[in-house]
Amino acid sequence: MTRDDAEFLAIRALGHIAGDDDLLGDFLSLSGLSPDELRERAGEPETLGGILDFMLADEARLLAFCQAADLKPDLPARARKALPGGERVEWP
């Protein structure tokens, strides 16, 4: 997967998160970002990696996103590996 493809997938995940108040609240709480900071940093590769980390940390959350986005469940993990810090993450 290319880095551009990975970033696009992470942006789709962010859209999924932003569309659910509970998910957005959980993400903001875990990331320590304010809504304004998230808007400012949403396109940064490191932030996009964090978005995918958030999705990958919970199987139910991951599968709900994949189903809503019509994605194979392995794609977010592959995308994460293409972003900064992803080479150190081992998702099953």
Image: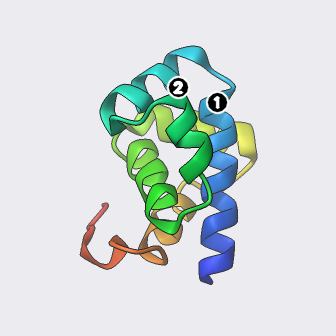
Q: CB of mark 1 within 8 Å of CB of mark 2?
A: yes
Asked whether residue 1 appears in the rendered view, the answer is: no
Residue sitting at 59 percent across and 48 percent down? 40
Residue sitting at 40 percent across and 74 percent down? 84
For disc 2, the marked residue is 24
Q: CA distance from mark 1 to mark 2?
A: 5 Å
- Say above or below: 74 vs 60: below
Q: Quadrant of residue 20?
A: top right
**Dot 1: what SS?**
helix
Which amino acid lies under the numbered mark 1 shown in the image of this protein?
Answer: Ala
Could you say where residue 53 lies in the image, as x and y percent from the top left? 38, 52
Asked whether residue 65 appears in the rendered view, the answer is: yes
Which amino acid lies under the numbered mark 2 shown in the image of this protein?
Answer: Leu
Depth order, front residue of 4/35: 35
Residue sitting at 33 percent across and 43 percent down? 57
For disc 1, the marked residue is 18
Colour scheme shown: rainbow
Depth order, front residue of 85/89: 85
**Dot 2: what SS?**
helix
